[in-house]
Amino acid sequence: MFDALLNQLLTDTTHTSLRIFTPELALSGGIVLMLLARLVGLDKQLPTHWIALWATLAAFAVALVYFFDFTRNDYGPVEFFQGLMVFDRLAACFRLGLLLFLVFVITLTVLGGIPDREDAPDFYTLLLGAAVGMLIMGSANHLLMVFLGVEMASVPSYAMVGFLKGRRQSSEAALKFVVYGAGAAGVMLYGISLIAGMLGTAELPELASRLQALYAGGQATLADPTVRILALGLLMTLAGFAFKLSVVPFHFWTPDAFHGAPAEIGGFLSVASKAAAFVLLVRVLLSVVDLPLGNELSGVSMTLGVGLGVIAAITATFGNLAAYAQTNMKRLLAYSTIAHAGYMLMAVAALVVLRAGAESNTAEASFRSGRAVEGLLYYLAAYLFMNLGAFAITALIRNEIFSEEIDDYRGLGYQAPVLAVGMGACLFSLVGLPPLGGFVGKLFVFASLYDAGSVHPAMWGILAIGCLNTVFSLFYYLRVLKTMYLSERPAGARPVRVPVGSTAGVFVLLVTVPLIFPLGIYVDLVSRVARSAALALFP
């Protein structure tokens, strides 16, 4: 019996699990090579960023092959590592996007000069380690892997925020990040233990059926102690997600962490951790709210969806209003990140409301739910380029003028046109102006809110708040461009010269051009991929 079980485990691990896990193994191999290179002194001859870049490109190539194979043959979800993780079209799309983003981030760190050669092995080890954790988050199929993925992504991030040694601001930001992160992790772990203990399982696909069996034929309201305990466990688990997403009231670490960290790290944290957390949040919420029609817990699920929508509206409003008073570009982008987390959380709220209020398990219900996930994924795709572009241009300007204050950007529109035009494309996309990619992503999210409003009218109010916030955000983004174009460059100010043909100029074009053409105009291709990944969640 034991031999048969051991053989089954070894067969599954070697023939299925490790093969699917190859991109993560490639990144892990890169980490080992970087540490060995430092140990034997090879990092003096071969810059460590080359090892990190080639490991990431290898992982991206494998992920691309799996993506095309998975979509071409229309495989269903594949569980691996004995069901701890799952590989489906959503995981394939997220894996591809994250690894592409990681290639851009490594390139940006080389252009920005952070880190220096001495600290490069440590920095890229942390960067790739955080990426492995985020990849695990995107494929988690078990509450244990949920917590493990979140912590594997968080712990290296703490160190990266405080990576500029000797700077009080950087050390203070890292300390705040660690304190908030440790508290959120403890609360999240306790919530996970409550859910697993009450339902008798930690497997995500089993949670809904256990909930259904627990309350079959009974009255499931918050007056029931068991429902209260499960609701408390879910809320405590969501607190961990709220920390990763910078959702109000778990946002306090974000401005200080982004201000104290280099812009390159701020760009990584603002996009990668948000994308991983949202993909994981969708998986966890669907595992507890995707219940059969007429289930006694549908009312609780509806309350959860509306509550998420209210928190999303508060988050977006706070982020946009707080950004008005900022004079530092990184702090402005930090509050912008909070606001955009609110927009994306609106799509998740719409998804929960649509699933809780579905009249029947029909193709139409799946399509409407899938459209909410599609909007979230499209928004994340646009957010990858527009937020990375804004942080990248901030880093490149910092290298020229040694400042990140918005007032020091005066006159750069004519002195460094490639940076100014790129910044304009990123900021207008963050606002959501057509024909940029941010407009299409925000349009999809608002369309899902409109659909959810037919189930619960409160979602229409949240839609109105989202539209008003779009108008609010225009003013503080325009203030940056006004400083760059309508103010004269002060006499004696350091010149900024980044020609279009320079390495930095080409990088800016590579990041910002997709906002205007593929994501803003040629919508169908990206939308089709996002829709395919979304509908895979609703068989």
Image: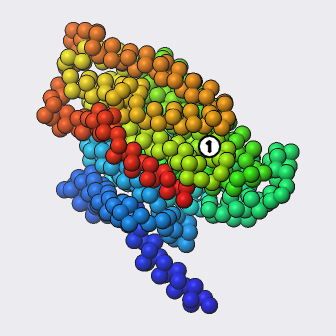
- Where is residue 10 drawn, in percent x and y? 49, 81
Horizontal relation, residue 376 to residue 287: left or right: left
Q: Secondary structure at mark 1?
A: helix
- Where is residue 510 drawn, in percent x and y? 24, 39
Q: Quadrant of residue 268?
A: top left
Specify the quadrant that holds the N terminus: bottom right
Q: Is residue 398 above or below residue 441?
A: above
Horizontal relation, residue 62 to residue 400: left or right: right
Mark 1 neighbour density, 10 Å: few (under 14) some (14–19) many (20 or more): many
**Residue type (three-letter) at the residue carrying disc 1:** Leu
Q: Is residue 184 visible?
A: no
- Where is residue 235 drawn, in percent x and y? 69, 45
- Where is residue 520 drawn, in percent x and y? 33, 34
Q: Nearer the viewer, residue 260 or 103?
A: 103
Q: Residue at x 41, y 53 (%)?
A: 93
Q: Residue at x 50, y 64 (%)?
A: 77
Q: Is residue 387 above or below residue 531?
A: above
Farthest residue toward the left?
A: 501
Residue bearing the label numbered 1: 354
Q: Residue at x 75, y 44 (%)?
A: 299
Instruction: State the colouring used for the structure image.
Output: rainbow
Q: Nearer the viewer, residue 187 or 414?
A: 414
Q: Quadrant of residue 24?
A: bottom left
Specify the quadrant that holds the C terminus: bottom right
Q: Residue at x 63, y 35 (%)?
A: 454
Q: Nearer the viewer, residue 481 or 290?
A: 290
Q: Is residue 61 visible?
A: yes
Q: Is residue 425 above or below residue 246?
A: above
Q: Is residue 256 above or below residue 110?
A: above
